Amino acid sequence: MSVNDPFARLPEAASFTVTSTTVTDGEVLPPGQLSGQDRSPQLSWSGAPLGTKSYAVTVYDPDAPTGSGFWHWAVADIPATVTELPEGAGDDTGSGLPPGAFQLPNDARAARFVGAAPPAGHGPHRYFVVVHALDVETIGVPAGATPAYLGFTMASHTLGRAVLVATAETPAAERLEVSRLIPAPAGAVFSVLTDPKGHVDIDASGMLMDAEGDRVARSGDRFRVHMDREALGDVPLGKYEVEVVITTLVPDEEIAWTVEAGRGPHVRHIYGYRLEPAEGGTLVTSYYDWSQIDEGWKRRAVFPIVPESALKATLGILERTVRRRGR
């Protein structure tokens, strides 16, 4: 999140009060003001400077990764006699706006309020909800103007600003999934995935050297894998062994496992495959989920340790392995 102040280089203006029954200053935006529900917040204001002849209302995210922020809402020419807007006033028709007021197209190019939707993993964003007190009855911008143009025009007519700042954040995704149609029945694919040596055969990393143990048949089953991290030349772990612990097993439908190595706490990330019958064979989805890892590991910020490209490569090797075993 940036620390930039969107008003830092604008002319100074008096402050007055804005409150809301839906949005709290300094707090997280509620679901109604997020993308999907897209309801403009309820707003009430008081104490505007003497000489105020109209108001404008804007909602702006200066932290959006655009280089220019993101305008979520802009309303111009609100009469000076109006000091409140109901929640949802900024719908497609501006149903809650007073006569004479109009909405400008936001940065989604829709003349309405659009809710917050920060990119996953981008950190918290700030949303400046601002009531601008102006010294003119009409600001004189066309209905199709941008909020930025409205802001430029308002700069020389602003008597005061009432500001409320809320936040929103979308957590980073903690799961990868890739799929591939393998021209073979689910049983043939599952036969490879339940065989400890099959895991070595389909490894795309070059780290799995060998495996020992019986074919797995149920959740809780285990087998041992001999690893060689030197094959990657990235982390000086050398050669070691891990226990693969099956966490999910539904015959011909899904298998998943976690890995235990050395002394705890174990990482508890999950690897798995889902199998679905499809025209021409079996749709196989490989997934890697680190959403439930131990907090100590999470703080290391090294996840995902398996890239999406590795999952795709493994699916290709799986198809080749199934075909060879079928012969």
Image: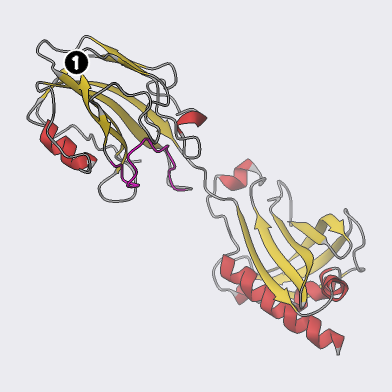
Q: Residues within 10 Å of mark 1 (few under 14, many from 20)?
A: some
Magenta span: 105-119
Circle 1 SS class: loop
Q: Is residue 96 one of those drawn in magenta?
A: no
Q: Identify the image quadrant of residue 284.
A: bottom right
Tell me the residue at 79%/85% (across/down): 323
Q: Which residue is under mark 1?
A: 80
Q: Is residue 19 left or right of residue 310?
A: left
Tell me the residue at 78%/58% (across/down): 256
The N terminus lies in which quarter of the figure? top left
Instruction: Report the magenta stretch's main SS.
Output: loop
User: Whole-percent x and y of residue 216?
Assistant: 90, 64
Image position of 312 with respect to 302: above or below: below
Q: Identify the image quadrant of residue 91.
A: top left
Image position of 80 with respect to 300: above or below: above
Q: Is residue 110 one of those drawn in magenta?
A: yes
